[in-house]
Amino acid sequence: MAITTVTGPSFLALQVADVERAANFYENIVGMVRAPQSPPGAVVFATSPIAFGVRGPSPGTDLAAGLPGLGVALWFACEDARALHDHLAAEGVDIVTPPFASPFGDTFAFRDPAGYVITMHTG
């Protein structure tokens, strides 16, 4: 039996306790645009090349049992990481790593309301 080739991620989602709170954060604070349709229990954003969303926990997942995002490294490209950093800092968002020059362009990391650390870079 031949094994099929995996071509890469097609959708990324964070499991959160409060979907609407997380969706409002990514839409109104970070600046993502909601996709026209989302499945029940989730909000999908029109990110490219891969859609990103927030969703309720999968059956059997206890978010209170551990740290959100433990072992997860989630990076997003944006037009101007330093400008986004300044905006998020002004909004009171927890900045985990201040902007620095990296091989991927200006880069910084912040913590979202569910506790996930998200890295942004100018891409």
Image (cartoon, rainbow, N blue to C red):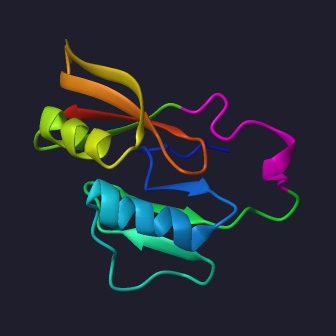
Check residue 68 for magenta coloring.
Answer: yes
User: Which residue does the image show at 49% across and 44% down from the upper left?
Assistant: 6
Q: Position of residue 7 (x, y in %)?
A: 41, 44
Q: Is residue 2 above or below residue 20?
A: above
| Percent x, y of residue 34 | 33, 74
Q: Nearer the viewer, residue 2 or 107?
A: 107
Q: Is residue 70 magenta?
A: yes
* Up-down relation of residue 10 to residue 35 (above or below): above
At 85% across and 53% down in the image, what residue appears?
62
Q: Nearer the viewer, residue 44 or 31?
A: 31
> The C terminus is located in which quarter?
top left
**How far across and down, in percent of the image, does residue 53 sit?**
47, 63
Image quadrant in which the N terminus is located: top right
Q: Main secondary structure of the magenta part?
A: loop
Query: How many numbered tags mark residues here?
Result: 0
Question: Considering depth in this image, is 123 or 6 the residue closer to the camera?
Answer: 123
Residue at image x 49%, y 73%? Answer: 43
In the image, is 114 to the left or to the right of 120? right
- The answer, for residue 123, to whether it is visible in the render is no
Give the percent coordinates (x, y) of residue 69.
63, 38
The magenta stretch is 61-72
